[in-house]
Image (cartoon, helix red, strand yellow):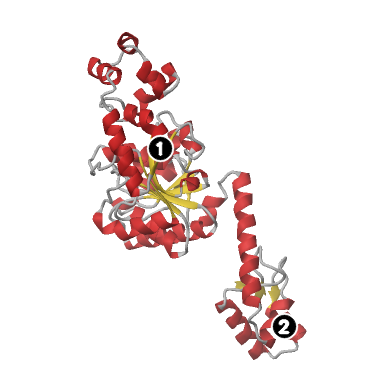
Amino acid sequence: MEASLSWLAMTLTPGVAARLSARLLREFGSPEGVFRASLTRLEECNLPAPVAQAIFKKQNFWRAEKEVAALRALGARLVNWTEPEYPQSLLQIYDPPVMLYVRGDAQILNEPTISIVGTRRPTAYGTQMAERLARDLARRGLVIVSGLARGVDALAHQGTMAVGGRAIGVIGTGIDVCYPKENKKLYEKVLERGAILSELPMGSHPAPENFPVRNRIIAGMPLGVVIVEGKQYSGSLITARLAMEFGREVFGVPGNVTQEMSFAPNQLIKQGAKLVTSAEDVIEKLPTPIRAALVHAEAVESEERNLLAGSDLNGSQKTIYELLNVEEPRPIDDIVETSGLNSSVVLATLFDLEMKGMVESTQVIFPTVMPRKGSFSGPRMGT
C-alpha cells in the first residue's frame, strides 16, 4: 500500500484529473518522477500555477497517508494502471482512470464482463428483462457490471445474485459510501460475489458530475453494454454511446415504441446496436475464444449437474434417460416402443425428468425429446 502513496498524492491534487495525470505520467515516467520535477519544469508542461505549486510542494502526501490508512481499515486497496489487476480493457479508452479503489476480489476485474444498464424507473417489462438477462448471462459465466443505482442497475445485480453469479459494482461515490442507501444489502452481496469499484476518493458523496465520469468505466470495462430501458436524454444512452466510441459491442432490448422508456434502446437498435431478446443474442456477438470458454464451462457444469442428478433416478427414469441421444431429438413414440414402457409411464417419467432440469421437450412435426446440448451421456432433453 505504501507504494501507492505517490500515485494517490498525484490523483488527490486538486485540478489533476485523469487526462492531466496521464499527461504527467507520459512526461515524467512515474508519479515519483512527477514529484521530483522542478517547479520550472512543471510550469513548462502548461500546468495552472496552483497545480504546479501543489505538486512541487508535495502538498497532498499527508492526505494520501490518511487515505491509505482508511483504505486499510476498510479492507480495500488501490490498483494503478501499471498493475496486473487493473482492468486491461480500460487501458484501451482515451481517458482511463490512473488509479482505482477496489473492495473485494481484484482478480475479477479482468474476467469476461457484460454491463447491463438502464433507467432508474423501469416498467414491469424492463424489470423482467433486466433480471432475466442478468440471470442467464451470469449462469453462462459472465461477470455482470452495473452501477448499483436504483432501477435496472440494481435489478441486474439482483438477478446475478439470485443464481450465484459474480458481479462488479462501479459506483459514483467513494468506495466507502453506498448510494442509494436502500441498496446497502445489495452492495454487500455484490462485494461477497465480486468487487466494488470507484475512481473517487474515500468519503466522496453522490454529486451529479460524478456519474458521467463513472459511466465511462461501465462503458469501457466490459465486452459489451446491454441497454434495457431509457429515455431520450438518459444516462444509459450516454453510456451506450461511450461504449460505441470505445469499440465495445452495444445491445438494445427492444421496447414499446409508444413508451418514452423505450426510446434509448430502440434508437440504438436503429443506429446499429444488436437487438437482444435473450442471453444467446449477447453471447453470439462475443469474441470466439471467450464464447468457446463459456460453452466449455457450461458443458462441464452441465455434466456435473447431470451426474449428480442421475445418481438419484428410479428405474423408469434411468431407462428413459439412457435412451436419449445428445446429438438429435427422439420422438416420444420411439421412446415408448424402445423402452417397453406404456405411454402413460413414459409421459409421466419425462415430466419428472423435466422438473429435475435434466431434459427439455421440443415440438417439431411431432413431439420429440433429447438431452440438452453439452450434457453428459444422455442427460437432459433439449432442442
Mark 1, Cα crowd under 10 Å, few <14 / some 14-19 / many 20+, is few
Q: Residue at x 44, y 38 (%)?
A: 220
Q: Residue at x 60, y 49 (%)?
A: 291
Is 133 or 331 nearer to us in this picture?
133
Q: Is residue 39 left or right of residue 22?
A: left
Residue 23: horizontal and vertical position, in percent? 39, 20
Kindly identify the amino acid type of the residue bearing the numbered disc 2: Thr
The quadrant holding residue 320 is bottom right
State the residue position of label 2: 319
- Relative to residue 152, is residue 371 depicted above or below? below
Q: Is residue 381 visible?
A: no
Mark 2, Cα crowd under 10 Å, few <14 / some 14-19 / many 20+, is some
Looking at the rendered image, the quarter that the C terminus falls into is bottom right
Going from N to C along the chain, the mark reached first, 1 or 2, is 1
In the image, which is nearer the foreground, mark 1 or mark 2? 1
- Relative to residue 58, is residue 169 depicted above or below? below
Residue 34: horizontal and vertical position, in percent? 37, 19
Residue 139: horizontal and vertical position, in percent? 52, 60
Q: Residue at x 61, y 74 (%)?
A: 358
- Relative to residue 254, is residue 29 depicted above or below? above
Total marks shown come to: 2
State the residue position of label 1: 1
Kindly identify the amino acid type of the residue bearing the numbered disc 1: Met
